[in-house]
Image (cartoon, coloured by chain):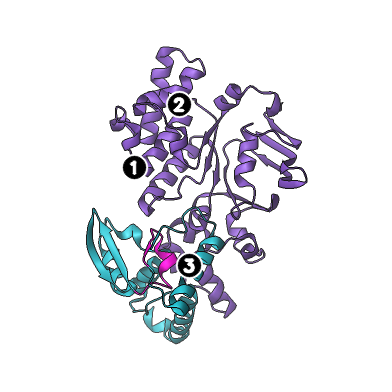
């Protein structure tokens, strides 16, 4: 369990990138973190990973203050996938890249091999094990970054906009991968601007605006009309706009809409 | 000419960029060519859509002419934006034809009309 209490962070004195944020993430949750560019999403996740030190407040992981945990101990529990996977890829084969984390954490050679094989299988990269990472396409690189995180056998994955710059198929495959990991118990914290994905996959949505938490709840509830999501830089998915438009004319949307718009529709319409 | 100008932007930022491009196009007469993966962003703006697959132009034309083609190709279907996924599916199940929806408000308008027409015939169709 991750408990964040009255967290503050300033890049410059008095200029809050994260302000008074409190939230709890329970094991096994699938949480989407959204908000406009510059609202503090990435800063918040970097604070969770201890890549930044809080200006105020605290972050507890299973009752332990993360500020006092060693980076390696934290990495063992929470995997972090950067927005740009190129930033974390540097070895000459996919398999060796994935093995880096377990090696650094002091896994035995046999266990490193096992963890690498498991991560390759989980991300569908088995056939690319000996490939040179730089030759992978964007979606495959993103999978490699996830595999590298998984190889350290974390309980929680934090991903910073993993779907940006990917086509629809890449997005869907990635989200199915995450949903599959989540079903097996992995806690997922996903930063995304994609409202369709958010409605389809996240059971819980947290919205940041100017560093402050302005919404924390069910995705359907967020789009139900009571929230001024436009002022948070967000927009409703197509299915939501159509249903809202029809309801405002006192027409109940055809039930079909939900059936035909994939998971987003099933959950909303 | 812009290469994915809105990728990694929040929905508002993406909308703003495309509003700016539309403004330049309409008021300054500047021709805009944009590489975009998310077709829902260009639906309301683009005069022409060019689809590349493996380095080849496989389709070119107005959005409303290209979209049915994409919808009918299994490997391209996922390119169809959500608004048009709704449109194609509703057309099929309601056995009707809707116009070229460029934004949700047009869908709402047309659906409202259609549903009002049909409310009297529910018994018959059942």
Which residue is pictured at 36% across the width and 31% down the height? A121
Give the CA separation, mark 3 to mark 1: 27 Å
Q: Which mark is residue B30?
A: none
Asked where in the image residue A94 lies, by quadrant, the reply is top left
Q: Chain of mark 2?
A: A
> For the residue carrying disc 1, how many other residues have a C-alpha within 10 Å: few (<14), some (14-19), or many (20+)?
few
The picture places residue B85, in percent across and down from the top left corner, at: 38, 66
Q: Which mark is residue A151?
A: 2
* Residue A99 visible in the current orientation: yes
Q: Is residue A259 above or below residue A184?
A: below
In this view, the residue in front, B107 or B60, is: B60
Give the CA separation, mark 1 to mark 2: 21 Å
The picture places residue B112, in percent across and down from the top left corner, at: 48, 81
* Residue B83 visible in the current orientation: no
Could you tell me if the residues under marks 1 and 2 are in contact, i.e. CB atoms within 8 Å?
no
Could you tell me if the residues under marks 3 and 1 are in contact, i.e. CB atoms within 8 Å?
no
First in sequence: mark 1 vs mark 2: 1
Q: Is residue A237 above or below residue A32?
A: below
Asked if residue B95 lies left or right of residue A264, the reply is left
Which residue corresponds to mark 3? B18
Q: Chain B shown in which color?
A: cyan
């Amino acid at each position: 369990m991750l408990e964040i209490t009255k967290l503050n962070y300033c890049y410059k004195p008095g200029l809050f990138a994260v302000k008074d944020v409190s939230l709890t993430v329970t094991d096994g949750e699938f949480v989407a973190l959204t908000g406009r560019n510059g609202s503090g999403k990435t800063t918040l996740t970097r604070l969770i990973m201890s890549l930044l030190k809080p200006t105020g407040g605290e972050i507890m992981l299973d009752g332990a203050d993360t500020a006092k945990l060693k980076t390696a101990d934290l990495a063992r529990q929470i995997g972090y996938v950067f927005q740009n996977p190129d930033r974390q890829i540097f070895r000459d084969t996919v398999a060796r890249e994935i093995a880096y984390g377990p090696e650094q954490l002091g896994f035995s050679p046999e266990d490193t091999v096992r963890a690498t094989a498991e991560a390759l299988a989980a991300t569908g990269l088995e056939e690319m094990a000996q490939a040179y990472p730089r030759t992978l396409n964007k979606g495959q690189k993103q999978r490699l970054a996830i595999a590298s995180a998984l190889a350290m056998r974390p309980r929680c994955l934090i991903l910073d906009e993993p779907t940006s710059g990917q086509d629809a198929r890449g997005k869907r495959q990635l989200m199915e991968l995450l949903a599959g990991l989540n079903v097996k118990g992995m806690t997922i914290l996903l930063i995304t601007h994609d409202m369709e994905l958010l409605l389809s996959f996240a059971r819980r949505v947290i919205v940041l605006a100017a560093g402050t938490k302005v919404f924390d709840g069910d995705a359907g509830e967020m789009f139900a009309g009571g929230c001024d999501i436009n002022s948070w830089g967000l927009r409703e998915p197509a299915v939501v706009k159509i249903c809202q438009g029809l309801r405002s004319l006192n027409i109940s949307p055809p039930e079909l809409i939900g059936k035909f718009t994939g998971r987003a529709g099933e959950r909303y319409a | 000419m812009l290469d994915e100008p809105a990728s990694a932007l929040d929905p508002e930022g993406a909308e703003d960029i495309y509003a700016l491009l539309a403004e330049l196009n309409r008021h300054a007469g500047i021709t805009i060519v944009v590489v975009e993966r998310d077709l829902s962003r260009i639906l309301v703006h683009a005069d022409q859509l060019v689809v590349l697959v493996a380095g080849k132009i496989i389709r070119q034309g107005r959005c409303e002419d290209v979209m049915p083609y994409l919808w009918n190709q299994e490997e391209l279907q996922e390119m169809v934006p959500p608004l048009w996924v709704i449109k194609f599916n509703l057309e099929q199940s309601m056995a009707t034809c809707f116009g070229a929806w460029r934004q949700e408000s047009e869908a709402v308008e047309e659906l409202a009309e259609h549903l009002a027409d049909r409310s009297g015939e529910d018994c018959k169709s059942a």
